[in-house]
């Protein structure tokens, strides 16, 4: 069963296209993670937050990635990482065009 992973954390930038350029290699790395289906990158310059919404094949791969990414963020100096894992209601998501994969 697919699992949705939501992560957010304090982030001072860069944002927008500068973020896209600076984190391109990270995006390529994330795309190769075991069980990874997709990620939507999130950013809010006014509140200084970053993060993402991810879809993984199952809970095991979502948890494994969360552990790895939390450690990576802490290595970048991020002290506070918020994360939640959700089940996906595929029937309702299909009606509303959710990108289930």
Image (cartoon, rainbow, N blue to C red):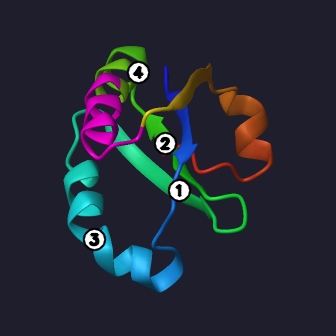
**SS label for mark 2:** strand
Tell me whether circle 2 and circle 3 mark residues in contact (CB < 8 Å): no
Callout 4: SS: loop
Q: Which residue is mark 3?
A: 24
Q: Residue at x 37, y 27 (%)?
A: 66
**Which mark sits nearer the N-terminus, 4 or 1?**
1
Residue at the far bottom in the pictured view? 17
Picture coordinates of residue 77 (x, y %)?
33, 43
Q: Is residue 29 above or below residue 86?
A: below
- What residue appears at the point 41 percent right and 21 percent down from the top-left corner? 58
In the picture, the disc for residue 58 is 4
How crowded pointer 3 is (Cα within 10 Å; few <14, some 14-19, many 20+) is rated as few
User: What separation in Å lies between label 2 and label 3 (alpha carbons)?
Assistant: 17 Å
Cβ atoms at labels 2 and 4 below 8 Å apart: no
Q: Please report whichever mark, 3 or 4, sits nearer to the chain's N-terminal start.
A: 3
- Give the mark nearer the N terminus: 3 vs 1: 3
- Mark 2 or mark 3: which comes first in sequence? 3
Q: Residue at x 35, y 31 (%)?
A: 70
> Measured from the top left, where is residue 99 in percent x and y?
59, 51
Q: Secondary structure at mark 1?
A: strand
Q: Which of the 4 image quarters holds residue 63? A: top left
Cβ–Cβ below 8 Å for labels 1 and 2? yes
Give the magenta range: 67-78
Q: Quadrant of residue 29?
A: bottom left
The residue identified by callout 1 is 40
Q: Position of residue 30 (x, y in %)?
A: 27, 50
- SS assignment for the magenta stretch, majority: helix
Q: Mark 2 highlights which residue?
A: 54
């Amino acid at each position: 069963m697919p699992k949705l992973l939501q992560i957010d954390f304090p982030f001072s930038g860069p944002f927008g296209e500068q973020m896209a350029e600076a984190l391109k290699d990270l995006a390529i790395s994330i795309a190769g993670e075991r069980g990874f289906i997709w990620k939507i990158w999130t950013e809010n310059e006014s509140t200084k937050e970053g993060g993402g919404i991810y879809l993984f094949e199952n809970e095991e791969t979502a948890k494994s990635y969360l552990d790895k990414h939390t450690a990576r963020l802490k290595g970048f100096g991020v002290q506070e990482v918020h994360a939640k894992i959700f089940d996906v209601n595929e029937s309702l998501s299909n009606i509303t065009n959710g990108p289930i994969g």
